[in-house]
């Protein structure tokens, strides 16, 4: 029998505040039989494991091979809500994460200098636990957040070196068009873009920059590692002001005069 199965059954039963009698009744077995499984004096057959797996909405693979006592509260909630990757039949995984002394989810900070390491270490709990952490009281305690420092001007007016915080997206089919996301990719690492979701139809995302100087580009499903929905950003810099229409026209006219002047000088 799996080393983790007895403790996992007990863990999930207590989490639902069920007695052995109540759980046994729910999965059509005797209380003494269930007690034997939890106390490792009896081994359940495949039919019993299937019933337990179905009742707790956890895959058999996860039930047998994972130590639930080591999972964070966020990971357990996601699993109970049906995000177990084995049940979903997808390649989505349980997120490597950290918690504080009260078992509350931290917000890990991936600074510019750490982004290269995050590209390869994002799934390694040992790497994640050495990242700086903090908390923001105005964010939901029921969701998982992570903050990334961005670079470049492709998402202006959000400035270079701003810190953008995202909410972890487990189900990529829920990515919404025309919203901003932080995406970890195989080739480019962390990118911050506005997204068009074509995963169901064409197996890809189309990524757009807020800065119209940059052309949109496509990202195929196999290139995606993680997705975080943008929720806010922090920066010591003020965004550039939006020019009033008459001032904008004046600026364009001035640029045109400068260009004409340069052309005349070239002719000379």
Image: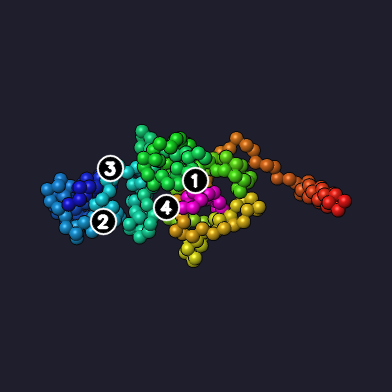
What secondary structure characterizes most of the magenta part?
A: strand
Secondary element at image label 3: helix
Reading the chain from its start, which is encountered first: label 3 or label 2? 2
Residue lying at 60% horizontally and 44% vertically, measured from the top left: 152
CA gap, disc 4 to disc 1?
12 Å
CA gap, disc 3 to disc 4?
21 Å
Residue 105 is one of the magenta-drawn residues: no
* Residue identifier under label 1: 166
CA gap, disc 3 to disc 1?
27 Å
Instruction: Name which quarter of the figure residue 98 lies in.
Output: top left
Q: Give, as a single range, the part of the protein colored magenta.
A: 179-194
Residue lying at 43% horizontally and 55% vertically, measured from the top left: 171
Tell me, yes or no, if residue 145 can be seen here: no
CA gap, disc 2 to disc 4?
20 Å
Q: Quick one: which residue is furthest to the front in this view?
A: 268
* Residue identifier under label 4: 170
* Residue identifier under label 2: 60
Residue 205 image offset from top left, x and y in percent = 51, 59
Q: Is residue 39 above or below residue 47?
A: above
Q: Residues within 10 Å of mark 1 (few under 14, many from 20)?
A: many
Q: Is residue 107 above or below residue 230?
A: above
Reading the chain from its start, which is encountered first: label 2 or label 1? 2
Q: Quick one: which residue is furthest to the bottom in this view?
A: 201
* Residue identifier under label 3: 69
Q: Nearer the viewer, residue 152 or 77?
A: 152
């Amino acid at each position: 029998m799996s080393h983790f199965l007895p403790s996992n059954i007990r863990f999930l039963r207590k989490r639902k505040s069920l007695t052995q009698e109540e759980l046994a009744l729910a999965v059509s077995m005797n209380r003494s039989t269930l007690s034997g499984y939890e106390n490792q004096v009896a081994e359940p057959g495949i039919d019993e494991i299937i019933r337990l797996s179905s009742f707790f909405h956890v895959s058999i693979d996860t039930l047998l091979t994972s130590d639930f006592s080591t999972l964070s509260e966020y990971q357990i909630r996601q699993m109970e809500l049906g995000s177990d990757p084995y049940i979903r039949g997808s390649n989505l995984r349980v997120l490597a994460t950290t918690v504080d002394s009260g078992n509350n989810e931290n917000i890990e900070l991936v600074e510019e200098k750490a982004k290269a390491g995050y590209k390869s270490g994002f799934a390694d709990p040992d790497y994640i636990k050495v990242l700086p952490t903090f908390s923001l009281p105005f964010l939901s305690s029921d969701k998982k957040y992570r903050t990334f420092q961005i670079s470049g001007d492709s998402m202006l007016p959000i400035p270079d070196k701003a810190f953008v915080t995202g909410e972890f997206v487990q189900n990529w089919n829920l990515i919404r068009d025309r919203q901003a996301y932080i995406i970890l990719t195989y080739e480019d690492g962390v990118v911050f873009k506005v997204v068009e979701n074509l995963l169901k139809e064409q197996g890809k995302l189309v990524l757009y920059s807020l800065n119209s100087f940059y052309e949109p580009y496509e990202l195929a499903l196999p290139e995606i590692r993680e997705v975080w929905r943008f929720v806010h950003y922090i920066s010591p810099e003020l965004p550039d002001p939006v020019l009033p229409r008459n001032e904008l026209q004046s600026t364009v006219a001035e640029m045109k005069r400068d260009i004409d002047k340069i052309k005349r000088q070239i002719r000379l």
